[in-house]
Image (cartoon, coloured by chain):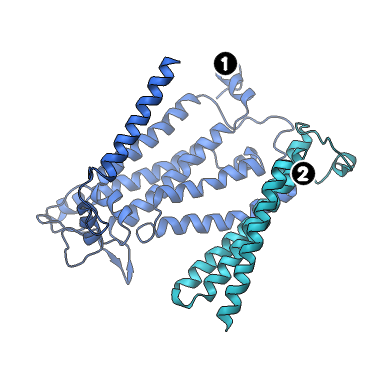
Chain colours: A cyan, B blue
């Protein structure tokens, strides 16, 4: 019973991940400037990598036939998911900040630019 | 235009011939049940206490082949890598990494610095486990060293190279640790001969387990833990050597271009 619930939730997370990857790919092609394209890329890394990894961990936990190895597979997936969760935002933040500071990426279709107004994080 | 056509044609022909020889032409020997005879020899002997003179006492076939079955080959591969590092040091000779630029060394934003600090203990744990499990699971000394060398790299990027100088990790310190690692590899290679000379037993350079005419063998078990004789010693030494070899290259490459040019012209700081 628990196995069935775990595998169903895991499969749902995998589907969500695939959809996020598709949305991110469309965004990378269609968005007009560097910063919104970066936003699309992070949809791909968080939605398209973090959710599927958690889903894979849940599916592994629910797979009796793997024996004790299911804890290894699931644990490794959760550690990888945690690393993606903290590294992807830090990386895209560093990219965006560097691009904005060096003025190599022009914020062209611009609604608001708070970083220009108050300087952003130190 | 004609030259490109010749290059493209010869590349294509080479790839097709190689693919044919490897897959259909049985260039690597016939395939029985998905395994070639050579692979079967290694699979049957890599962890097989019933064949003491052929086994490497390691369940990880790749490490057993790399450090035991063809150990001398790996030794010279390692030598090529360290010659490349020595070449880099030779290019940077006379350049001191201790010179600082005014106002430099601020580093990236606080967010990146905090994430880097979280990452470092995880990275140390993973790299050390790759090195210490090199004889049990895929990985080994070189891979562990490459994983560990990520730490100086991200420290240089997220903080700045001056942080490494403040932590007293200079070119000389890295060179010393790298030399300890290389000495460990050499020592592991010569230990069988030394013990053999002292105790009067026949032994070979880079010997791991006993051979038909040499009864010497390094301990395969330490207590209950499988350590595979020389393999764990090679992996740990290579881990040290690769970590600090790469660290030294990153330290040298991160010196500001102005400082390098000034010192290479010879009108810079005394050194």
Q: Quadrant of the C terminus of chain B?
A: top right
Q: Position of residue B25 (x, y in %)?
A: 23, 42
Residue B51 is labelled as none
Seen at 85% across and 37% down, the residue is A109
**Does the rendering let one see residue A89?**
no
Assess whether mark 2 and mark 1 are in contact (beta carbons under 8 angstroms): no
Q: Which residue is mark 2?
A: A36
**How far apart, in angstroms, are the residues tagged by discs 1 and 2?**
46 Å
Residue B211 visible: yes
Q: Secondary structure at mark 2?
A: helix
> Residue B83 vs residue A25: left or right?
left
- Above/below status of B160 relative to A50: above
> Looking at the image, which residue is at 32% across and 71% down?
B223
When the figure is inspected, residue B82 is found, relative to residue A85, above or below; the finding is: above
Which residue matches tag 1? B265
A117 or A106, which lies in front? A106
The image shows residue B180 at horizontal and vertical percentages of 39, 45
């Amino acid at each position: 019973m628990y196995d069935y619930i775990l595998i169903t939730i895991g499969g749902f997370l995998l589907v969500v991940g695939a959809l996020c990857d598709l949305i991110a790919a469309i965004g990378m092609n269609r968005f007009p400037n560097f910063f919104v394209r970066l936003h699309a890329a992070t949809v791909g890394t968080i939605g398209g990598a973090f959710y599927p990894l958690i889903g894979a961990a849940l599916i592994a936990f629910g797979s009796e036939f793997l024996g004790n190895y299911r804890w290894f597979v699931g644990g490794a997936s959760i550690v990888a998911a945690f690393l993606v969760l903290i590294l992807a935002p830090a990386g895209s933040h560093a990219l965006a900040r560097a691009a904005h500071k060096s003025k190599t990426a022009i914020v062209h279709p611009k609604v608001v630019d708070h970083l220009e107004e108050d300087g952003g994080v130190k | 235009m004609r030259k490109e056509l010749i290059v493209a044609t010869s590349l294509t022909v080479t790839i097709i011939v190689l693919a044919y020889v490897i897959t259909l032409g049985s260039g690597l020997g016939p395939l029985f049940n998905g395994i070639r005879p050579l692979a079967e020899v290694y699979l049957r002997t890599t962890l097989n206490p019933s064949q003491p003179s052929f086994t490497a006492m390691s369940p990880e076939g790749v490490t057993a082949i790399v450090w035991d079955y063809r150990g001398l080959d790996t030794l010279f591969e390692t030598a090529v890598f360290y010659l490349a590092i020595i070449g880099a040091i030779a290019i940077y000779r006379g350049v001191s990494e201790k010179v600082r630029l005014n106002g430099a060394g601020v580093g990236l934003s606080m967010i990146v610095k905090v994430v880097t600090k979280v990452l470092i203990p995880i990275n140390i744990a993973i790299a050390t486990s790759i090195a210490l499990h090199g004889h049990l699971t895929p990985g080994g000394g070189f891979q562990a060293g490459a994983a560990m060398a990520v730490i100086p790299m991200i420290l240089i990027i997220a903080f700045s190279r001056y942080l490494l100088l403040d932590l007293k990790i200079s070119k000389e310190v890295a060179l010393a640790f790298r030399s300890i690692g290389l000495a460990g590899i050499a020592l592991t290679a010569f230990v069988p001969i030394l013990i053999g000379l002292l105790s009067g037993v026949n032994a070979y350079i880079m010997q791991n387990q006993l051979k038909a005419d040499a009864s010497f063998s390094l301990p395969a078990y330490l207590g209950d833990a499988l350590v595979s004789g020389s393999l764990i010693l090679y992996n740990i030494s290579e881990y040290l050597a690769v970590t600090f070899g790469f660290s030294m290259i990153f330290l040298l490459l991160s010196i500001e271009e102005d400082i390098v040019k000034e010192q290479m012209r010879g009108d810079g700081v005394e050194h």
